[in-house]
Image: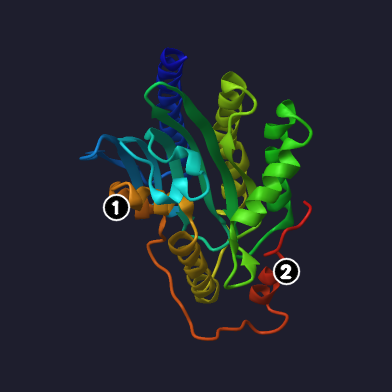
Amino acid sequence: MIQNTEIAIEQVEAFLLTLQDNICQTLELADRKGHFEEDTWQREQGGGGRSRVLKDGAVIEQGGVNFSRVYGDAMPASATASRPELAGRSFQAMGVSLVIHPRNPYIPTSHANVRFFVAEKAGEPPIWWFGGGFDLTPFYPFKEDVVHWHEVSKKICAPFGDDIYPRYKKWCDDYFYLKHRNETRGVGGLFFDDLNELGFEKSFAFMQAVGNGYLDAYIPIIERRKNTSYSDRERDFQLYRRGRYVEFNLVYDRGTLFGLQTGGRTESILMSMPPLARWEYCYSPAEGSPEAKLSQWLQPLDW
């Protein structure tokens, strides 16, 4: 069984490397100016990765698409806190994680991640699971964009069971929630973790569907909004709302905590941060303004 798992690990890695290539190439075509620069890195405790970042593009102000595969003798606290059975096991973790921060405030920020973990202990079967998802964070939402995002999500989930989309949509709404702000980070999408009950092949197939489906969900939104004109007003609001993104990633995000606690490459872990953001004390948008309308979207809704 352990030997079969090792073989499967290489299959997962091959998919993830190809996924990173495909996403970078497609985003470059959508941007038409910027190119992803690659840094390869090694982790002292085991493993490494390749980080790709696009800066100052025509459409993408900054975006990163990272692949990593790391090893360790013990799971970090961020993992064992909710799963104490993992304590004392060595681990392998690999995944592709991306965040795209467009320049135009009418194009939403997007995030996607797909990952695979194996925790092993001598003389015992390995414990493995898949996780991932994607979510959308608009500043000036358009209903057709949000409906499209969720329609792609439903299409991805449909072959795996009628309950998959509503379960993973709710998980996304619950996970990307800023308790201290009493609002969701954006308009949701999909989020799943600890996936193994489908068996390895079907669980892997679902992870692949989510990874491949991200571009189907996001690229049409970029194309619809990238030529929309905007002023300093919209730009200022975009930077203010980006502050919420930073707050979530530094306070709540398990991936950020896992990377930092396992001694990952700090620059790669924090590439999810926007290149510019701002905070304003007790900011409140004018009643009835486009900025005020955003709050109506920052709650779990049935799209």
**Image: 62 above or below 25:** below
Question: Picture coordinates of residue 3 (x, y %)?
Answer: 41, 13
Label 1, secondary structure: give it: helix
Residue at 73% across, 80% down: 288
Instruction: Say which amino acid is labelled 1.
Output: Thr
Instruction: Say which amino acid is labelled 2.
Output: Gln
Q: Classify residue 239 as left or right of residue 142.
A: left
Question: Picture coordinates of residue 239 (x, y %)?
Answer: 47, 70
Residue at 39% across, 28% down: 121
Residue at 70% across, 50% down: 170
Whether pointer 2 and pointer 1 mark residues with C-beta atoms closer than 8 Å, the reply is no
Label 2, secondary structure: give it: helix
**Image: 146 above or below 207:** below
Return the residue nearer the eye: 54 or 155.
155
The answer to whether residue 24 of the structure is visible from this angle is: no
Q: Which quadrant of the view contains residue 108?
A: bottom right
The answer to whether residue 160 of the structure is visible from this angle is: yes
Return the residue nearer the eye: 94 or 278.
94
- Residue 266 tag number: 1
The residue pinned by badge 2 equals 296
Q: Which quadrant of the view contains residue 106?
A: bottom right
State how the image is colored: rainbow
Q: CA distance from mark 2 to mark 1?
A: 35 Å
Question: Picture coordinates of residue 286 (x, y %)?
Answer: 66, 84
